[in-house]
Image: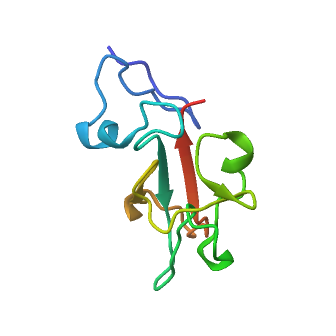
Amino acid sequence: MAKPLREGASEPNDPTEPPLAADAASLPTTLPGTSASVLYILNPANGETVAPWNGSSSTTYPDDEICKETTTIGCSSNLPSLSSCNIWCVSATASTTYAASPVLPWKWVRLMLK
């Protein structure tokens, strides 16, 4: 029998239920520096390029922290130096299904093992 929900609370997901295969397939399973070891979830506005792995342009919202947190990826002037996310990172665009209302203007989130 399910417990009644209190205001502001919700029941957690069933811990015995495995995650969706599509969700689990993109999650990093190795430390940064190896193939697909960093996942970026992107949230670009219409017509905007968001590429945190490309430190050569400030207009792509570069990840200026990853080079300080790990030494296993290619960096130049403390910024990642990839033109495309195909070596140590993978990317996915955020689903509008879970968007806040009003829409929050965040650009990217990085997931990696530590």
The residue depicted at 42 percent of the width and 18 percent of the height is: 3
**Residue furthest top in the image:** 1
**Residue furthest bottom in the image:** 47
Residue 80 in percent (x, y) is at 62, 58
Q: Of 6 and 18, which appears nearest the observer?
A: 18
Colouring style: rainbow
Residue 114 in percent (x, y) is at 61, 29
Residue 79 in percent (x, y) is at 69, 60
Q: Of 60 and 67, which appears nearest the observer?
A: 67
Give the tally of numbered discs.
Answer: 0
Q: Quadrant of residue 54?
A: bottom right
**Residue furthest left in the image:** 21
The residue depicted at 49 percent of the width and 32 percent of the height is: 10
Residue 17 in percent (x, y) is at 28, 22
Relative to 20, residue 3 above or below: above
Q: Quadrant of the N terminus?
A: top left
The residue depicted at 63 percent of the width and 73 percent of the height is: 56
Q: Is residue 84 left or right of residue 7?
A: left
The residue depicted at 38 percent of the width and 60 percent of the height is: 95
Q: Is residue 2 left or right of residue 58?
A: left
Relative to 73, residue 28 above or below: above
Relative to 72, residue 19 above or below: above
Q: Quadrant of residue 69?
A: top right
Q: Quadrant of residue 28?
A: top left
